[in-house]
Image: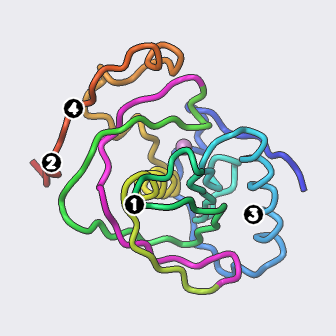
């Protein structure tokens, strides 16, 4: 296994739409997933998408650690998600803090759908289908955005909630509540 170099904001690898994975069982895909797991472990995040390590394929890995599991949602072990299709369930969105390994040292409050249905393939090429909500839904939306060349900075609705992680952690300011997605308005 190997620790891969993570592209940082400004690198065009992060802006290009990724291509579907044709064969999840292929040795090079298995190797990539193993290397991404090692890279994520080393970097200390909760998710990593292939374009972040300069590979333009539609796959990411993510986990929900105990510290981020909600009262009604459990931990999720490191999970591979290949060729995902996300379908929001309902219009409700929330703002919460997000960071990104490609944007080190910064974070922002980003609007995301509260619940969604995820359909994808897992690392064995088997169907992966689940309904997710809360932090897990947020991480999945963040990582899936990477596959379309979208960074969280492009989702910001209020730049007052964008800053250096170190600074924002010093101030426990309340996040704005949003109840509904604004559809094409
Ligand atoms: Ni990211």
Marks 2 and 4 sit apart, C-alpha to C-alpha, by: 10 Å
Main SS of the magenta segment? strand
Distance of mark 2 from mark 1, alpha carbons? 20 Å
Which picture quadrant has residue 134? bottom left
Is 185 left or right of 92, judged from the image as shown? left
82, 23: nearer the viewer: 82
Q: Which residue, given by chain and number where applicable, does mark 3 sit on?
A: 33
Residue drawn at (39%, 72%) of the image? 131
2 and 4 marks in contact (CB < 8 Å): no
Q: Position of residue 139 (x, y in %)?
A: 48, 52
Disc 3 crowd, CA 10 A, few/some/many (<14, 14-19, 20+): many
In front here: 49 or 18? 49
- Residue 176 shows which numbered tag? 4
Say which of marks 2 and 1 sits in front.
Answer: 1
Quadrant of the rendered image containing residue 159: top left
Q: Disc 3 or 2, which lies upstream in sequence?
A: 3
What's drawn in magenta, residue-wise? 105-125
**Mark pair 4, 3: CA separation:** 36 Å
Q: Decide if residue 172 is on the left or right side of residue 54.
A: left
* First along the sequence among labels 3 and 1: 3
**Distance from Cα at disc 1 to Cα at disc 4:** 23 Å
Residue at position x 40%, y 66% in the image:
132
Q: Residue at x 78, y 79 (%)?
A: 26
Task: Examine the structure image and report whether residue 72 is included in the region drawn in magenta.
Answer: no
Q: Residue at x 84, y 46 (%)?
A: 3
- Label 3 vs label 1: CA separation? 29 Å
Color style of the picture: rainbow
Write down the residue under mark 1: 72
- Which residue position holds label 2? 179
For the residues bearing labels 1 and 4, Cβ distance under 8 angstroms: no
């Amino acid at each position: 296994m190997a620790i891969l170099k993570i592209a940082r904001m400004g690198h065009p690898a992060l802006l290009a739409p990724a291509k579907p994975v044709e064969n999840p069982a292929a040795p090079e895909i298995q190797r990539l997933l193993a290397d991404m797991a090692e890279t994520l472990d080393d970097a200390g995040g909760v998710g990593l998408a292939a374009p972040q390590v300069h590979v333009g394929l539609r796959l990411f890995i993510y986990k929900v650690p105990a510290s981020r599991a909600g009262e009604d949602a459990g931990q999720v072990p490191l999970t591979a998600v290949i060729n995902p299709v996300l379908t929001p369930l309902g219009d409700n969105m929330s703002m919460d803090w997000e960071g990104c390994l490609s944007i080190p040292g910064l974070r922002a409050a980003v609007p995301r759908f509260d619940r969604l249905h995820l359909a994808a393939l897992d690392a064995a090429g088997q169907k992966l289908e689940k309904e997710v909500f809360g932090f897990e839904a947020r991480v999945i939306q963040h990582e899936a955005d990477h596959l379309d060349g979208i960074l969280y900075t492009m989702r910001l609705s209020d730049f007052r909630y964008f800053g250096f992680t170190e600074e924002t952690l010093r101030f426990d300011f309340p996040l704005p509540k949003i109840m509904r997605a604004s559809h094409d308005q």
